[in-house]
Every structure is written in structure tokens, then in C-alpha cells.
Image (cartoon, rainbow, N blue to C red):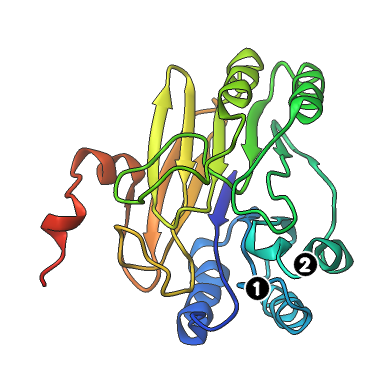
Amino acid sequence: MRLVQLSDIHFGSLFRQDVYDLLVDEINNEIKPDVLIITGDLTDDGLLFQFKKIHEEIKKFECQNKIILPGNHDYRHTGYLLFKKFFSSKQIFELGNVIVLTLGTARPERDEGEVGHRQNLWMEKTLAKYPDHVKIIAMHHHLIGIPDTGSDKIIILDAGDTLRSCLQSSVNLVLCGHKHRPWIWKLGPLKIAYAGTASSNRFRGFFENSYNVINIDANKKIELEIKIVGGEKFPLDDLVEKYTSFKDSILF
């Protein structure tokens, strides 16, 4: 099975239509995923015209299985009321031997995220029903800090509790967006993968538009790659192993 995670489209003032069109063409004609997961911040300001436009833009993806969740930018300016009018609120997706759960971390008019005790408990109870599946959690906010992204005051407030629930539930992979910085952390059997910004100029420490490609084979082995929009594709691990700091990667 092949999944694509893209994040932080940010339709608004810093949205790049040319990059987005190239992204759509790549995913439809080159990557051809079984599942498309968009981990939030579809809009920049949560405004009605932005939701109308991005709703139409997302229809351009030919993938039949789309999982779409909100980010903090989508919940601005009463966007928390608009999001559910344009996109499904479904949180459980059973896809063969893969189970994907989405966690809502965005809160109205707040930049920081929160999962909450009830949602963590729901995750634990739900995943207990799928002991033999590959378990994937998708959320917007990041669970662990990432290099070159500044202050972590907008991390998930109850990140420790959520990590405990993920480890206790034998989650294989957590997909996050929010920080616009592709990265990966590994906590024993748990992988936490972060996607960059797919189609905006809101870069942090990584200055190319990108998305993640996840391949899961019949033996439930997970391989994660980063794809530069219009460019190369390589293992996400390489980004960490060959890390170059912000100050060394930019010429002033």
C-alpha cells in the first residue's frame, strides 16, 4: 500500500498555485497513492472564500481515499465552524491491514494544539480492536520539537500523554504537520514523521516544497520517503542523517 502525506497547503497570501499544480500532477501521474492524507492548514486564515477554493483544488487529486484534517490556521475566524461544512469529520479509516486514526489537535483561535484525555482514551480503546493491523495516527500539531523551527510553545500541550497512549497502543507511525519542516524521530518501534509545506512560502529550515510518501509492504514493513515537489525523492532518514543546520545551509 502507498500513502501520501501532504500538509500545510496554506491557501492564502503565500500560496503558490504553480507549485500546487505541479504537486497535483506528480501525485496523480507519478506517485499514484492508494491513500492521500492531508494533515491540516489547508487555508491560511480559515475564511469562507479560502475554504471554497481549496475544496475545489483538492478535488483535482484523483486518489479515491482522502483523509483530511484541520490545522490551527483552519480554525481561525470561525473556520472551526466552516471546516466541517466542506470536509468529513470521520476519524477511523480501515484500509486493508492498515488502520488510520485522525486526532483533532486544533482549537478555535489558538496556535498551540491539544489532544485531550478523552481523545487519547478513545484512541487506546479503538486501536485495541486492531491488534494485527499497521497502526497510523494522523494529526496536525507536532509531538516532539524539530531543529530549525524556533519556539516550541505551540507544540501539543499534552504531548507526553499522547506519546504514552501511542506507545501503549503499539502505534507504528504518527504523521504530523504544522512546523513546515520535514523530519523523522524514532522512539523504539514508533516512528514520528513530519511533513514540510506542500505549496506555500512559509519555510522553516527546509526551503523547498515537499511531501511524504509512505510504502507499506505485505510484511507490514514501513518505508518513508520525502518527495521534493518537482524534484528528487529520497529516504526521510537521510534528511536526519545528513542534517545541515539552518545557518550552514543558507548564504546571506
Q: Residue at x 63, y 26 (%)?
A: 162
Q: Residues within 10 Å of mark 1 (few under 14, many from 20)?
A: many
Give the side of residue 18 with respect to residue 49, left or right.
left
Q: Residue furthest top?
A: 168
In depth, the one of 56 and 152 nearer the eye is 152
Which of the two discs, 2 and 1, labels the residue nearer the N terminus?
Answer: 1
- Location of residue 136 with respect to 229 vertically, above or below: above
Q: Which residue is mark 1?
A: 45
Q: Position of residue 231 (x, y in %)?
A: 32, 69
Q: Position of residue 37 (x, y in %)?
A: 64, 53
- Spatial CA distance of label 2 from label 1 is 8 Å
Characterize the local packing of mark 2: few (<14), some (14-19) or many (20 or more) Cα atoms within 10 angstroms. many
Location of residue 186 (image quadrant): top left
The reply to whether the C-beta atoms of the residues labelled 2 and 1 are less than 8 Å apart is yes
Image position of 35 with respect to 91: above or below: below
Residue at 52%, 35% (x, y): give it: 143
- Quarter of the image with the C terminus is bottom left
Q: Is residue 158 left or right of residue 202?
A: right
The residue carrying mark 2 is: 79
Q: Secondary structure at mark 2?
A: helix
Q: Residue at x 55, y 74 (%)?
A: 24
Identified by mark 2, the residue type is Gly
